[in-house]
Image (cartoon, helix red, strand yellow):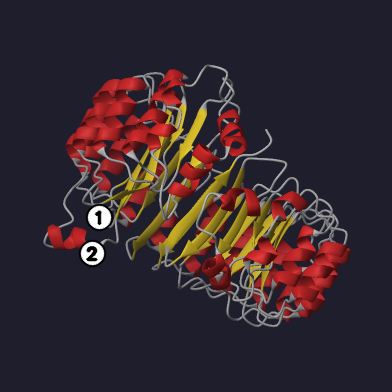
Amino acid sequence: MATASIESVLNLGELPNGILETVIRYLTIDEWGILDIALCTHQDVRGIYLQALSSERIQLFVINDDFWNERLDSGILKWIAARKIRVLSWVNSNVNDGILHFIANELPYLQLLDIRDCCIDHCNEITDVGIKAIAKGLRNLQSLYISCHITSDETYYEENDGDLGNFITNEGMTSIASGLSNLNSFHICGRHCNISDVGIGAIVNSLPNLQSLSIIECGITDAVINDIVNKLPNLQVIEISECYNVTGAGTAIIANGNLRYLRSLCIGCTIFNITDTNVAVVTSENLPNLDSLRIEGCRSLTDAGAKSISNGLPNLLSLYVTSCDNITNTGFNHMINGLPKLQLLYIDGHTCKITDSGLAAIANGLPCLQQLGIIGCSEITDVGVSALTTGKFNNNLISLSIGARELSDMAVIAIVNGFPNLQELHIVGRDVTDVSAAVIAKGLNCLQKLGINGCRKISDAGIKEICDGVLHKLHQLDISHCDVSNVGIRAIANSRLSHLRTLYIGYSDTITKKGVKNIGKSLPNLRYLDICECSRFMKERPMDGMFLEEYMNHSGGPYELYTYLDGKVVVTVHPAGL
């Protein structure tokens, strides 16, 4: 496909001050010339696009994925610099030292920089050089989030003889410690990096005002944990995850430290290092303000450890338990009976051994519960869900996510009858059918988010029930992996779901461009449409600038269309009518 010359687009760095109205996202496009052509040849689209950049009030600019072209995005960076942007989130993107140098030199006012999940390959690398530039140039920075992942490009591995290198090392951490004295929130994922006690120790010893610290996949030991509790008395959030040299003693050090302000603690994926004995010292006496606990991948924890948590933290408000293989119904019963103030409970049942009797215990023991998530529990059936709906918290529950292979329409009927005030519902079960869709549509008039993705027995008839029901407040709907065709999509487009802003319709072999056509025009508030692995749609998708106007004819904006082909994201952004 021919692409228009980028020089024909107005340099965004030279746009007048009146041009700023909303956040614009530059996202991956297989042939990014679609956007280029639309801007260059369709004056209405181009004018709308420029108008979407107009607001001096906005202090956030987001650039996603690998939509990077040196000439275009250098103009964008100049535009960011000219507007004194305070917050820059460049997540899941191709970022390199050169870009970080520009940010450091041109954005001295920056207060938050988020470069998590940035792709590094033979063209894009973040090293200590880029980190040092940030540390030198962004003296006003208050929050910094860094993580990288290696590209799946096989040539990168071949060119480097399988050596992934050490992109960020202790040297980079030391530069942050010495240069960013105003930092109060720091997140580092050390995957493919060489960060140890030396680097994190420098951060801890030099930044006493840190309130939030997240350390993932770094080679730290218990020695740094000791430094954290002694040097950072104002910490409110700690996450230590996949740091395999940290032992259970590290947890005890946190619990016994002088962290009087700590509100949230995550100890995760340390495999066999954290035991029942270690968590026994995590108590409200030592951590009086702790109200959120996340336990991930602690496979040596047993029911005894669960009992210790319930005995030690009676004021806990939020509890997440994932991949803790040896906690059974008995352990969850201890937690439920000992945590009467719990408002949020999330259990990943893919490894946690909770059954119907565990759901019955939740129903009887958590009167304050507002949000409940139980996903992938193979032994949960309709009987357990029915027991759950008889609980003390029925009128308080506003969010429920529950997924189990054996669930059927009977479970959904019980949920609708038992939790009339639900605002969010995500249900997955192999025997959840159109009957469930009809029951939800007629019974949950407070519902704002509905996910029935993965319910393969829900068809166009069920979607029509949802559209004709009482779900007038619904603003997010996920019907991915359902048996939905163009008929169901047209039912949504012609429905009374006027508040719908986010729609997921992926993984369908029957949805075509005819079904998607003008859906934005029919749903005036729609902002995000996710079409993932819809094979027929992808085969028919037009590859020219008219794609924006023909299929996303829309009176609102901005509008984003996400599609996926062969594992690559294809996105069109259509800001319209602002």
Residue 478 shows in the view = no
Quadrant location of the N terminus in the rendered image: bottom left
Residue behind mark 1: 245
Residue at x-position 49% and y-position 62%: 564
Question: How far across and down, in percent of the image, does residue 63 sit?
Answer: 44, 40
Q: Quadrant of residue 150?
A: bottom left
Q: Are marks 1 and 2 in contact (CB under 8 Å)?
A: no
The residues bearing labels 1 and 2 have C-alpha atoms spaced at a distance of 30 Å
Mark 1, secondary structure of its residue: loop
Kind of residue sitting beneath label 1: Asn
Q: How many marks?
A: 2
- 201 or 182, which lies in front? 182
Kind of residue sitting beneath label 2: Glu
Question: How far across and down, in percent of the image, does residue 92 sit?
Answer: 40, 48
* Comparing labels 1 and 2, the label whose residue is closer to the camera: 2
Does residue 258 sit above or below 218 in this rendering? above
Residue at x-position 45% and y-position 52%: 29
Residue 277 appears left or right of 450: left
- 186 or 446, which lies in front? 446
- 257 or 264, which lies in front? 264
**Among the two numbered marks 1 and 2 on one chain, the one whose residue lies closer to the N terminus:** 2
- 3 or 173, which lies in front? 3
Question: How far across and down, in percent of the image, does residue 488 sit?
Answer: 75, 69
Does residue 12 sit above or below 472 in this rendering? above
Mark 2, secondary structure of its residue: helix
Residue behind mark 2: 154
Question: How far across and down, in percent of the image, does residue 528 sit?
Answer: 62, 50
Q: Residues within 10 Å of mark 1 (few under 14, many from 20)?
A: some
Residue 261 appears left or right of 116: right
